[in-house]
Amino acid sequence: MSNELLLLLATLSIVFYIWQRRVFAFWKRHGVNYIRPVPLLGCTREFLTARVPFFEQIRKFHEAPGFENAPFVGVFMAYRPALVIRDLDLVKTVMIKKFQYFNNRVLQTDPHNDALGFNNLFFARSPEWRELRTKISPAFTTGKIKQMYPLMVKIGKNLEDSAERLGSGSNVQVKDLCARFTTDLIATIAFGLEANALQNAKSEFFYHNKAIFAVTLGRAIDFAIIFMLPALATLARVKLFSKETTKFIRTSINYVLTERERTGQKRNDLVDILLAFKREAAANPEKSQKALDLDYLVAQAAIFQTAGYETSSSTMTLALYELARREDLQERLRQEISDFFGDEDHVSYERIQEMPYLSQVVNETLRKYPIVGYVERECSQPAEGERFTLEPFHNMELPHGTSIYMSTLAIHRDPKYWPEPKEFDPERFNPANRDKLNMDAYMPFGVGPRNCIGMRLGLLQSKLGLVHLLRNHRVHTCDQTVKEIEWAATSPVLASKNEIVLRLEKV
Ligand code: HEM
């Protein structure tokens, strides 16, 4: 190596060292207690070396020794300072009371090259987000969901048939079954499409849904940038969906939009709302023209398919896993199902909402396994006017762009709020125990104006799936059933590293 090169390397190393020292002094300078970072990786060594998933890294920050009574913890996501909020009042302040400073999520994809990722409701940033949310919300009202309920029941019955086909005594990969159910369900109610994932082992829709969450090394790197280092999103040209998935989503949604426009058919679903966007943009050329771009419409459809498929199928899977381990609870639920079905072949929309034990079971599943694992917001400080501070805990003004994380997983498993947190105990949510509940410590769907838009639908489809599956079938543990759930290290949401296998038995 030449002397010049050596000199250059030495200079770069010194510059890097000085820069990093300065960056890592951030929390100390502001008098905030923080977790000591290591060079290059900051506090996120375990995540960046693929030892733990992102949500588990956030949980570890929340549970870091020495911070048991702290309202927040300073951390470094690689080189970026971020704050993990532990105090439940401060969580409410950020998520609800001072929401005007926290409209945006931290995560981002490439604004220039990822039209489907950057523009969808989950990733959208204010002011576009607010407009999108207002316009899309009507697709999720109780009235709309009720209208769609008969379609949902049809898929519920298909799920029963699938269980029947699998046969009594078979060992079943439960996640696969539940994911096929939610794929079919979302495709029908959002787009009026038949995905046929339950009937057809090779359903294209199912294949692509799975591909979104199947993480290869390349995708894991993309996700690490999307979650943690959004400033690098453009440089690294990261995309939320792979090329192949993008092509599939574009083609199928384009087909649906064109068909609806051609036939003039109305279903009061997401597609109708998207077409209304387009008409409005065409009628108001002086306003934003984003909605004239097909990808802008496709982006919204894509996120519903993505957000609605994995979350609800994991909820169902984990509920079944817990119920297989506690057959007494399963029997109690089956009894309720049988009482509510009566002589009918389905439970009506109104009646399914009234099933008390089913609600308790689903609520407790999401307590123990809040599928997304954490919530996050980015702080936006105004150029003028009052700025956000950490009062009453600290007088520090958070710099514009600071990332804030809250670990729902840690809060849902904190014995301070949930005694015996490892126990699966639906009685926690028995209305008779209401005064013992601290609902501020329960946030499986996030909190405040930017919470989950699909909450009602997510709950309903998880309940419907459980009802149809457990009506005529029992699930048991078998020798292939894992004793404990270990997280899949590269999954963006809570998911078991090993298949969850249960034995199905016809009642
Ligand atoms: C059991 C099922 C579900 C769970 C546990 C869940 C959980 C969550 C969570 C934690 C968030 C972030 C909230 C926050 O930051 O405060 C979220 C956002 C979101 N979810 Fe869900 N979700 C579920 C089902 C669904 C369904 C069925 C859909 C749509 C069909 C959906 C669509 C979305 C969208 C679009 C957002 C972003 C909302 C926005 O930024 O305005 N989710 N979800």
Image (cartoon, helix red, strand yellow):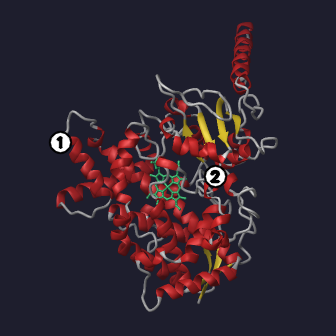
Q: Which residue is most to the bottom?
A: 343
The residue carrying mark 1 has its beta carbon less than 8 Å from ligand 1: no
Residue 283 image label: 1
The x, y position of residue 184, in whole percent, is 42, 68
Determine the image quadrant of residue 47.
Answer: top right
Mark 2 C-beta closer than 8 Å to ligand 1: yes
Type of amino acid at the residue the image marks with label 2: Thr
Q: Residue furthest right?
A: 66
Decide: is 444 above or below 347: above
Kindly tell me whether residue 376 is visible in this rendering.
no
Pointer 2: what residue?
A: 408
Closer to the eye: label 1 or 2? 2
Identify the amino acid type marked 1. Ala
Name the residue rendered at 41%, 48% in the picture. Answer: 246
Name the residue nearer the viewer: 345 or 237.
345
Residue 388 in the image, given as x and y percentages of width and height: 56, 31
In this rendering, the answer to whether 464 lies above or below 108 is below
Q: Is residue 278 left or right of residue 344?
A: left
Above or below, 432 relative to 408 = below
In the rendered structure, which disc, 1 or 2, sits on the residue that comes first in sequence? 1
Tell me which corner region of the image, top left, top right, bottom left or bottom right, holds residue 357: bottom right
